[in-house]
Amino acid sequence: QMVTASADGVLTFWDTSEKAREGVAVAHPPKKGMNKGHQRINRVRVAYDQRCLVTACNDHTLKVFDPTLQEEMATLVGHRGPVNDVDISRDNMYIVSASQDKTLMVWSSDSYQVLNRCVGHLGPVTSCHFGGLGHAVFCSASADSAVRVWETNTGVVVSVFKGHVGDIVGCAMGTTGPQVASSGLDGTVRTWDPVDGSQLQQFGRLDPYDIAYPMGHTGPCSRVLMSADCLRIVSAGSDGTVKVWKMTVKHEKRVNFVSFTPDRTRALTCSDDKTCRSFDTRSGTELTKIVGHTGGINMSDISPGVTSWELHNFPRRGPLQTSDTCVVATASKDHSANVYNINTGMTMHKLRGHHRSVNKVVFSPDGKLIATASADTNVCIWDAITGERRHTLMGHTGDINNIIFTKDCK
């Protein structure tokens, strides 16, 4: 089945196999006192479970329809201007809408009640898109030349990206990675890192003689989409072309260390660019970029998989994945070690106590302790759960480059 929407507020349902029209529904009828074009449907989204579809219209409302019965299920009222875009989370729990009134609204797909009103953009919000496999975050684009990432449950802004010249009319997020893509009236497509807000790549040139960037659209970009694996971006331009861009993910400086998680689904890399990154071993997609150190990262160690959910109360990605892990410790040239949740990139503990570069960090076999070896000739033992230092072992007269626990952790 296929659904099309028109400027007169009508939804048309098509049977693609028979190439025939199944039905017509007037989703947004004419209203007295509204400007010309108020019936125009700007976007239609179908839920991933195909339970419903949602329309965004110039009449300030959204309509929820049953695609099977072709009947209206609910009208979502709350915006004070035309609704430019709408998206449904991949777990089908939430709806987000973007409006000319400079706000976004998060709705429950069960009760159709407003959960959050997101205020922050200084111009009309032109686009919105959920990221990931669930509903944790979504991104938005605006005529204020900014892209924002929001936390769905709280409506709090997580990141703000600026770099486009003029209105931004499209934004997108992938399923497996954290990257955000945007397209603007300046004719460029850009990708952003939601961790530190930096621009990762730019496709298209503001100056036709600027050879630092590839040639792009010769006019404004209207829409942008990102593949689920975050490796490709598709953009549509007013020049009548559709372009596919290949994203590149790499460290900016020397890579010092590479390791695999116990389940072999992810690879971790540590670099002198002060970041630790995790990659999907099948697709090569960057899953997480971990920041927090002020110096290069020498190496990392991964907590035994069982401890991630038994000691730290983190959920497993799958009930049968006993080797799954999400806790990693890093050793850095900034004289410190950090403990992170690699699924979210969030810092759990900052281990401070050394006076020179930390050369080695290891977890004990039971995951309860962390040992760090440093160029300051000392070894520190830390509590992996609380991050507190338990012991400092002194006696060496030179740099300590390696350390290992015995099987009994004593």
Image: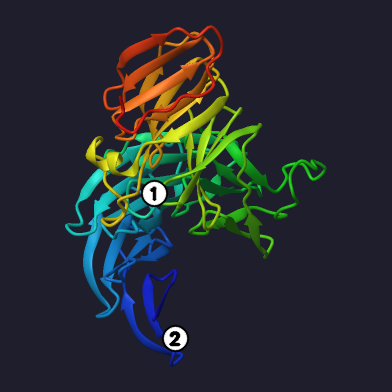
Q: Given the image, on which type of amino acid does mark 2 rest? A: Thr
Q: What is the quadrant of the C terminus in the image?
A: top left
- Depth check, front residue: 96 or 246: 246
Are discs 2 and 1 less than 8 Å apart at CB?
no
- Establish if 318 lies above or below 334: below
Kind of element beneath mark 2: loop
Going from the N terminus, do you reach mark 2 or mark 1 first? Answer: 2
Compute the Cα span from label 2 to label 1.
32 Å
Residue 223 sits in quarter: bottom right
Residue 199's image quarter? top right
Viewer can see residue 293 = no
Judge depth for marks 2 and 1 and give the one in front. 2
Q: Amino acid at mark 1?
A: Ser
- Where is mark 2, residue-wise? 16
Q: Secondary structure at mark 1?
A: strand
Residue 99 is tagged as 1
Q: Is residue 129 left or right of residue 398?
A: left
**From where the camera sits, is residue 390 visible?**
yes
- The residue lying at 25 percent from left, 35 percent from top is 312
Local packing at callout 1 (Cα closer than 10 Å; few below 14, some 14-19, many 20+) is: many
**Colour approach in the figure:** rainbow
Residue at image position (37%, 75%) is 11
Name the residue nearer the viewer: 10 or 146: 146
- Left or right: 103, with 238 as reference point: left
Q: Tell me which residue sits at (33%, 43%) in the image.
A: 305
**Residue under the point 33% across and 55% down:** 60
x, y percentage for residue 139? 43, 46
Q: Residue furthest left?
A: 111
Quarter in which the N terminus is drawn: bottom left
